[in-house]
Image (cartoon, rainbow, N blue to C red):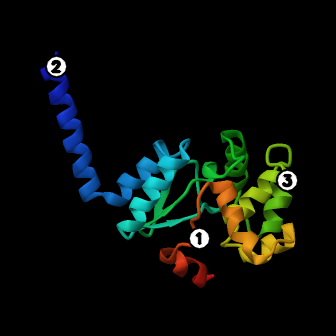
Amino acid sequence: FCKSHSVGYTQLTQRTAFLKANYPLEYLASLLTFKGNDNIDERKQYISEAISKGIKIFPPGINFSTNECIIVDDVIYLPLTFIKGISMTTYTAIAEERAKGPFGSVEDFCYRIDKRRVNKKVRGNLAKAGAFDKLYDRQSLLKRLFNAGDTELIMMEREVLGLYISNNIINESFYGDG
C-alpha cells in the first residue's frame, strides 16, 4: 500500500515538474484558473511567480476574457470571475451578450447588458479592475464614475481583484499601447 502511493506521488511530481519547466505559461495559467480562483493568497503567489519568470499578467478584458485564464500572445489574461461580484451567472450574461458581437465602448456595454444580471456595482467593479481598458482610459473612466483622486485609483483595482496587476512595471507596455 505505501509503496504504491509513493510511486503514484513520484510520478505526479515528476510530470508536474516537467510541465512547470517546459510549459511555464500554460502551467501558471492553469494554476491560476483552478487553484487561484478562490484563494487570494495562492493567486498572489502564482502571479508573483509568473512575474519573476518574466511572464506578463494583465487584468481581465471585457471583450475577450472568459471564466478561465487565457493566453494571448504570451500574456496571461485573468478571468472575469476573478473580479469581486462576478459570479458565473454574471459572467454568463456578459458572455452571451458578447457572443452577439464585441462591445464597442463602455456605453455600448451598459446599453446592451442585462441590468438585472449585471448591476451597477458589478459594472463599477469591472471598471475598477480594468476590464474596459481596451475601450476607454481607466483613469478617466474611474474619475468620471467615482470622482476619485489619483491615489484612490490604484486602490480600486486591489479592492476588486485582491491584488495589484496594472501597477506592475512588467505591464507598462500594455497601458502605453492604448
In the picture, measured across the screen, residue 76 lies left or right of residue 25, that is right
Residue 120, position as x, y percentages in the image: 85, 53
Determine the residue positioned at 85% across, 67% down: 146
- Give the SS element for disc 3: helix
Alpha-carbon span between mark 2 and mark 1: 47 Å
Tell me the tag on residue 120.
3
Among the 4 quarters of the image, the one containing residue 92: top right
Q: Which residue is mark 1?
A: 166
Residue visible at 72% across and 44% down? 90
Q: Left of 46 or right of it: where is 4?
A: left
Q: CA distance from mark 3 to mark 1?
A: 23 Å
- Identify which residue, 50 or 18, lies in the foreground: 50
**What crowding class fits label 1: few (fewer than 14 Cα within 10 Å), some (14-19), or many (20 or more)?**
some
**Quarter of the figure that contains the C terminus:** bottom right
Q: CA distance from mark 2 to mark 3?
A: 55 Å
Residue that numbered label 2 is attached to: 2
